[in-house]
Amino acid sequence: MMFSFHGQFFPGPPAGALRALRIASLIALSAFMLGGLLLAPMSKAQQEAAWPALELEALGRSVAPGETLRTYVDLARTFGGEAPMLDTLLVVTRGVRVGPTLCLTAGIHGDELNGVEIAHRIYKEIPGSTLAGTLIAMPAVNIQGLRTGSRYLPDRRDLNRAFPGNPQGSLASRIAHSLYQGVIRRCDVLIDLHTGSSSRTNLPQIRTDLDSPPALALARSFGVGVVLHGRGPEGSLRRAVLDAGLPAVIYEAGEPLRFQEFEIEQGVNGVRNVMVHLGMIAGDVSTARSEVYRKTSWVRAGDAIGVYLTQRQPGEYLEEGDVLGTVTDPASENSVTIVAPRKGRIIGMAVPQLVLPGYGLFHLGFDPE
Ligand SMILES: [Zn+2]
């Protein structure tokens, strides 16, 4: 069954305000009906009785406590107006107890696959009967990019540079607007799942605004061991949600166009840790101590050109002068050795390939807190 909110705009107060209003009115009503004081504290049973259905107005659906809704959000249509181009899967699991709304997005970059499986495992393994709050998962936001193995939308734009969007803008901007208004503004917390971009791989890491205490707490609770500072580029979903005053992080792990079990497991553990931390699920947390990096920079190929080879792996610790790899021009035999400029850690790197001058080879983090 298809529900469309393509091209529509749903004005109204933000989701948090709607929810507060709804809960407040139910608290007042239940207190009144019990003949008690309006400000009487609610028992746990009363709180749970006041836990209302989540109404996804944009989708014309409500999700009852304990229920999981799987539907397709039709964000854009292709030629002829009939065939959906971005009919992306939306899974909403409504808990049976009061709690926050966590949004989990993946595949905004269509070639980044690890997050698709992370989101899948989370919504598959967590039923509403064990949940407090609401889990909203979109495992393959840019489904067209996923089908074609492309980071971009069909208009060659990066969806993650178009948030919060504009209903009169480009295709990317319209899609971003529909997603933001229809789904994202309902979130209390966002985790957006990514991998390294083309021909690069990332050590599993969280990125967020370290100057926002709730965002930093969220990043630490993920527990993957590495946290980097960054609000995200202009137009990124992370930045739009942070700008709205809510905690948002991205999880970056591995490389595009493949499923990598270690990076997926780390991501699943991290999302579960966050949900335990938020009181959404019961369980033990397994967190590594976080190394927090405010300072990172790229080591580039410089003037070197040609065959880049390396024995290094993400996560390795380096001393100043350690050899990172070589770049050799097979025509001139001119070979350049790439070395660490100072003590640091490899948090991302290019996989061996042919490189041009100035190509970013190693993303290093320095002086962790
Ligand atoms: Zn990405």
Image (cartoon, rainbow, N blue to C red):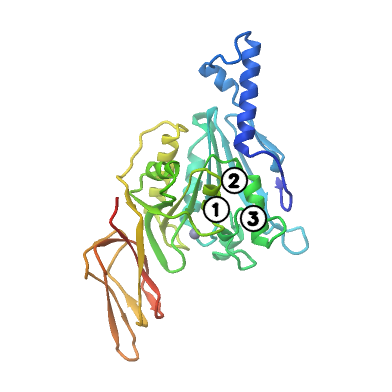
Would you call the spot at circle 2 few (<14 residues within 10 Å), some (14-19), or many (20 or more)? many
Amino acid type for the residue under numbered disc 1 = Leu
Q: Is residue 274 left or right of residue 86?
A: left
Along the line of sight, the residue nearer the viewer: 265 or 223: 223
Amino acid type for the residue under numbered disc 2 = Ile
Q: Say whether disc 2 or disc 1 marks the residue closer to the N-terminus.
A: 2
Q: Indicate whether 32 appears above or below 126.
A: above
Amino acid type for the residue under numbered disc 3 = Gly
- In the rendered image, residue 314, in percent from the top left (x then y), is placed at 32, 61
Badge 3 vs badge 1, beta-carbon distance below 8 Å: no
At horizontal 45% and vertical 61% (from top left) the residue drawn is: 258
Q: Is residue 348 visible?
A: no
Badge 2 vs badge 1, beta-carbon distance below 8 Å: yes
Q: Is residue 32 left or right of residue 282?
A: right
User: Circle 1 sits on which residue?
Assistant: 237
Q: Indicate whether 299 appears above or below 163.
A: below
User: Circle 2 sits on which residue?
Assistant: 184
Q: Is residue 157 left or right of residue 210?
A: right
Q: Say whether disc 3 or disc 1 marks the residue closer to the N-terminus.
A: 3
- In the rendered image, residue 195, in percent from the top left (x then y), is placed at 45, 59
Cα distance in 3D space between marks 3 and 1: 10 Å
Would you call the spot at circle 3 few (<14 residues within 10 Å), some (14-19), or many (20 or more)? many
Q: Is residue 234 visible?
A: yes
- The N terminus - image quarter: top right
Quadrant hosting residue 282: top left
